[in-house]
Image (cartoon, grey):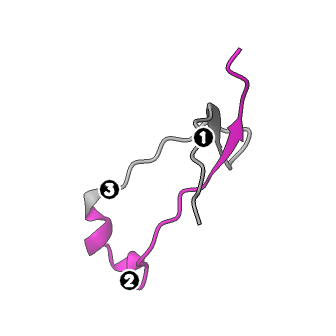
Amino acid sequence: MKTEVQNITGVSTYNVTPMKVFFYIDPEFETDAQMDGINNLILSYTFFKVSEE
């Protein structure tokens, strides 16, 4: 089965509104006792296809 590849233009937005968000993961995160048991971080975006015009 062949899959056709198509280029598209889009925009992605944060899934936190209406605030702007800046992500910085402090290197001390790994050694902070309050973070024991935290093994994953999930950053979520929504992608929207837009017209190239």
Quarter of the figure with the N terminus: bottom right
- Name the image quarter holding residue 52: top right
Residue farthest along the bottom direction in this orientation = 37
Residue 26's tag is 3
Q: In the picture shown, does residue 3 fall above or below 29?
A: above
- Name the image quarter holding residue 30: bottom left
Q: Position of residue 53 (x, y in %)?
A: 71, 14
Say which amino acid is labelled 3. Answer: Asp
User: Secondary structure beneath disc 2?
Assistant: loop
Q: Is residue 52 left or right of residue 28?
A: right
Q: Is residue 18 left or right of residue 38?
A: right
Residue at point 64% right, 34% down?
Answer: 10
Q: Position of residue 14 (x, y in %)?
A: 63, 44
Nearer to the camera, 38 or 3: 3
Residue at point 73% right, 43% down?
Answer: 17
User: Secondary structure beneath disc 1?
Assistant: loop
Nearer to the camera, 4 or 36: 4
Residue 36's tag is 2
Q: Which residues are magenta?
A: 28-53
Q: Which residue is denoted by mark 1 in the rendering?
A: 6
Q: In the picture shown, does residue 7 fall above or below 24?
A: above
Around disc 3, counting alpha carbons within 10 Å, would you say few (fewer than 14), some (14 to 19), or many (20 or more)?
Answer: few
Say which amino acid is labelled 1. Answer: Gln
Residue 31 lies within the magenta run: yes
Residue at point 32% right, 56% down?
Answer: 26
Residue 43's tag is none
Say which amino acid is labelled 2. Answer: Asp
